[in-house]
Amino acid sequence: MKGIIASPGRAYADAFIVQEPRIVVEKTSIDDSDNELERLQSAIDACDVQFESLIKGLDADDDTATIELLEFQQMMLEDTDYLDKITTIITEDKLNAEYAVEVASNDYIGFLQNLTDNDYLRERAADIGDMAQRLLGALLGISRAIEEPDHDYIAIANDITPSRMAELDQDKLKGIALEKGSLTSHCSILAASLGIPCLIEVTGLLEADTTGKRILLDAEHGELVLDPSKQQIDAYLDYRKAREQDLEALKAYVDKESRTLDGAHMGVYANIISASEVASLLEQGGEGVGLLRTELIYMEETTAAPSEEKQFQLYSEIASALDGLPLIIRTLDVGGDKDIDYLHIGKEDNPFLGYRAIRYSLDTPEVFKAQIKAIVRASAQGNVEMMFPLITTIDEIRRAKALVSEVFNELDKGNVAYNKDMKIGIMIETPASAFDSARMAREVDFFSIGTNDLAQYLFAADRTNAKVLELNSYFQPTLLRTMAQVADSAHEAGIMVDICGRAGEVLELIPLWIAMGIDNVSVSIPEITRVRRKITQTDKAASVKLLDKVLQCDTAGEVQAMLGGAS
Ligand code: PEP
Ligand code: MG
């Protein structure tokens, strides 16, 4: 069976079907609303105790995302609007507590779903639905307990709610296959951060007879094998052995210098979206944050952009936690596939070619300036740099920098501390900025090449459309020639040039980045040590010769044949 990879890896274990208890709510009239309110309160108290014990059972360092989610659900139990609505249905309409909880929860969920068609908030609506099921279970005395096997297993389900995910024994849970699921669901995000292989959208999964079967989950090729052959099992066992040895061997690279055999340095930074990732970045030996995507901070709000103060607190927290390591904060990259309803970008025929990123920011200076001010103020708390996304013209750079100057003046007047030498850079992710990189380099302190977008715009191939994925290959010589030109422009102007798109972590391409003189690659956290190991095994002088040859290639196939590798 085929599925979409939500978290990579492979597993071979017994299938275990995770089925939530079915809760059916009836609508009944009541006479004694005080009694009903008491029942509601006891159910809320019971859920509160459940949340407390779930949170206590988790590791404060490793399970931060799950803990934040459970705390969010626990807080919902105290939300006055939500509770008022339930109470009104009980006391005024004289209806039972279960029905009141269901109506109030559905209203809330419907409100969130209608508010936006944004994936992130849709998932938060699902989190509220999950919390409501727990509350209904407590009211109706239906146990949520499921009989988890006493041995390793692969969870099979339609979808897995976040709190169920927190309840499953993570030592035994070796893989997840879902009939539905989504890439932005907490289940997918948690699976990826816990390193549990996960496939979603496995059509026909629940109809297939998996009960009691030992199955093979291959979330590297997007396959679930119900009756694996001996050959497939042997291949899995070889894979597992090699992987375990590899993970052990990679630990040696946490503290190693990111230097080639002949002494050239290319730093390994990481891309993050929240403060909760800084601890694991440091544990893996990350040398800084090459890209803080700030969109999530905006997506978490429902009615207006986060205040300057809130952003300042958050950026400062991350900067301090990094303890002097660089933190490159990218200003809001809204639009494209990231819609935030309250910003009123509106539906567009071609959102990736439309009102996106710096274009939106320059057009809404009040939103933009609050973010700039928060970033500039945070520069007093650590090694903060600011970066503008989707630059296409020099005019955009100048306009953005003029706003930064305004902010500097305002802070000077108010005697507010900040780093006057804070570095300001741009992302090179459009053909216009790549072609004009020599001129643009005179305007800024650094470049960071966003290969995800640069490839999509260079080849006019939507990065979210699987049908044109091949055009977006990082082995395309046109992309590599463009990047080499950008790196040359940066060096001629004496500024730094990083890569923060996914191409930065593709191992076969690392020698090319070293040859181009890329200063830092910013990769996903689990890849830090693997990328560093590759750097330490590479010789810069030999890579320069290799790059010369690669840049002469006509096709992606030729590049691939020269470098090896498959993506
Ligand atoms: C990129 O485009 O390569 C990039 C890093 O930015 P994002 O993926 O957030 O668009
Ligand atoms: Mg981008």
Image (cartoon, rainbow, N blue to C red):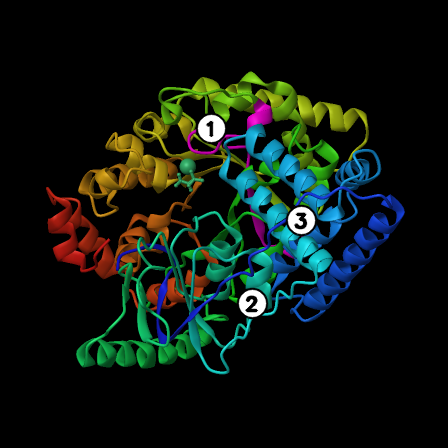
According to the image, label 1 marks what residue? 335
315 sits to left or right of 343: right
According to the image, label 3 marks what residue? 382
Q: Position of residue 144 (x, y in %)?
A: 62, 65
Of 447 and 314, the residue lying toward us: 314
Image: 347 above or below 71: above
Q: Is residue 337 magenta?
A: yes
Image: 499 above or below 89: below
What residue is at 39 percent from the left and 34 percent from the top? 428
Q: Position of residue 142 (x, y in %)?
A: 65, 63
Q: Which is nearer the N-term, disc 2 or disc 3?
A: 2
Which element is circle 2 on? helix
Kind of residue indicated by mark 1? Gly
In this rendering, the label closer to the viewer, 3 or 1? 1
Q: Position of residue 12 (x, y in %)?
A: 34, 75
According to the image, label 2 marks what residue? 283
Label 3 and label 1: CA atoms lie apart by 29 Å
Of 122 and 145, the residue lying toward us: 145
